[in-house]
Image (cartoon, helix red, strand yellow):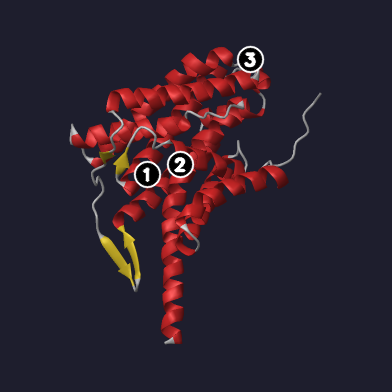
């Protein structure tokens, strides 16, 4: 009896770890968008949660109205949101590039509210049921159950994270992003087109945010205008936890937040899950504001 109980506890823990990986991989994808934008123009783009929400809506339309195959659903959502992300940067953020950071931050909140209300007008407030765009099969490893949707979500997230890492480290555009992030003025002297590099950063971040939105809506089966608020905030906390501006930090922070949220729901209470995640933000800001992978740097006066 004692052996059976011990096996049940281990199986339950492993099941929750898999669930945590599933949620964490989605948070990591969204957090990358926050951290890329902050890394290159030092702006916390609070509209990123709404980018995620619109990505889910476009995937919903592609899957239900046009009945596109799954690869076309994902690709169309990512491409459309990449274009919208670049447009937002051009219209709302570029004119404020040399303005105080507070002005850009307030603009980001304004863009977030604008997109949220635009979605309310276009799509109406009632939630839409996201169809199952991935084949649904349940695999069993002993007492542990893993759905094909979970495997696809984790696999897709890891694939795009590795692809982004290679893109940043190995390509000319990726090196340009790193250069602009390090020193914008020096990048201009080196002949790098800063405006194009920043637009490209918004495009990549928005595309990954849209993918995160699609995977989130598939996992929770719903699409609604305010769906980007809470996951967007949690992804922001993940970016801060890992070290905002550092891409591997956003990935690490996403997985940690996903794990903490899932284990809290499983072993403590679902009502405490959000409070504990937000408590992490307070603890990080108090004791290590640069995040897990961040380094303390002195600003020149």
- Mark sitting on residue 98: 3
Q: Label 1 vs label 3: CA separation? A: 35 Å
Res. 288 in view: no
- Furthest-right residue in view? 301
State the mark number for residue 208: none
Q: Residue furthest bottom?
A: 1
Which label was assigned to residue 231?
2
In the orientation shown, which residue stands out farthest toward the top? Answer: 95
The location of residue 89, given as percent across then percent down, is: 49, 20
Q: Give the label, 1 or 2, closer to the camera.
A: 2
User: Which class describes the residues within 10 Å of circle 3: few (<14), some (14-19), or many (20+)?
Assistant: few
Residue 255 locus on image (x, y percent)? 51, 51
Mark 2 or 3, nearer chain start: 3
Which of the two discs, 1 and 3, labels the residue nearer the N terminus?
3
Q: Residue at x 51, y 33 (%)?
A: 171
Q: Which mark sits nearer the N-terminus, 1 or 2?
A: 1
- Which of the pair 212/286 is nearer the observer? 286
Task: Say which residue label 1 marks.
Answer: 216
């Amino acid at each position: 009896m004692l052996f059976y109980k011990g096996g049940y506890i281990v199986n339950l823990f492993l099941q929750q770890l898999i669930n945590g990986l599933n949620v964490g991989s989605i948070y990591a994808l969204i957090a990358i968008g926050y951290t890329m934008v902050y890394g290159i123009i030092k702006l916390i783009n609070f509209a990123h949660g709404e980018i995620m929400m619109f990505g889910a809506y476009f995937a919903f339309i592609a899957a239900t109205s046009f009945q596109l195959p799954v690869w076309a659903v994902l690709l169309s959502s990512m491409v459309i949101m990449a274009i919208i992300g670049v447009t937002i940067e051009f219209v709302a953020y570029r004119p404020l590039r040399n303005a105080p950071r507070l002005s850009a931050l307030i603009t980001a909140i304004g863009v977030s509210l604008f997109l949220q209300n635009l979605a309310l007008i276009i799509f109406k407030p009632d939630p839409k049921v996201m169809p199952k765009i991935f084949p649904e099969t349940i695999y069993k490893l002993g007492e542990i159950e893993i759905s094909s949707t979970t495997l696809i979500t984790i696999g897709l997230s890891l694939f795009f994270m590795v692809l982004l890492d290679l893109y940043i480290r190995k390509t000319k555009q990726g090196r340009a992003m790193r250069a602009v992030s390090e020193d914008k003025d020096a990048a201009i002297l080196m002949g790098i087109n800063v405006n194009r590099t920043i637009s490209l950063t918004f495009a990549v971040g928005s595309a990954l945010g849209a993918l995160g939105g699609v995977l989130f809506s598939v996992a929770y089966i719903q699409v609604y205008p305010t769906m980007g608020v809470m996951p967007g905030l949690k992804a922001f906390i993940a970016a801060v936890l890992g070290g905002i501006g550092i891409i591997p930090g956003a990935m690490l922070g996403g997985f940690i937040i996903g794990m903490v949220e899932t284990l809290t729901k499983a072993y403590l209470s679902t009502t405490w899950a959000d409070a504990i995640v937000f408590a992490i933000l307070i603890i990080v800001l108090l004791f290590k504001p640069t995040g897990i992978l961040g380094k303390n740097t002195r600003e020149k006066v």
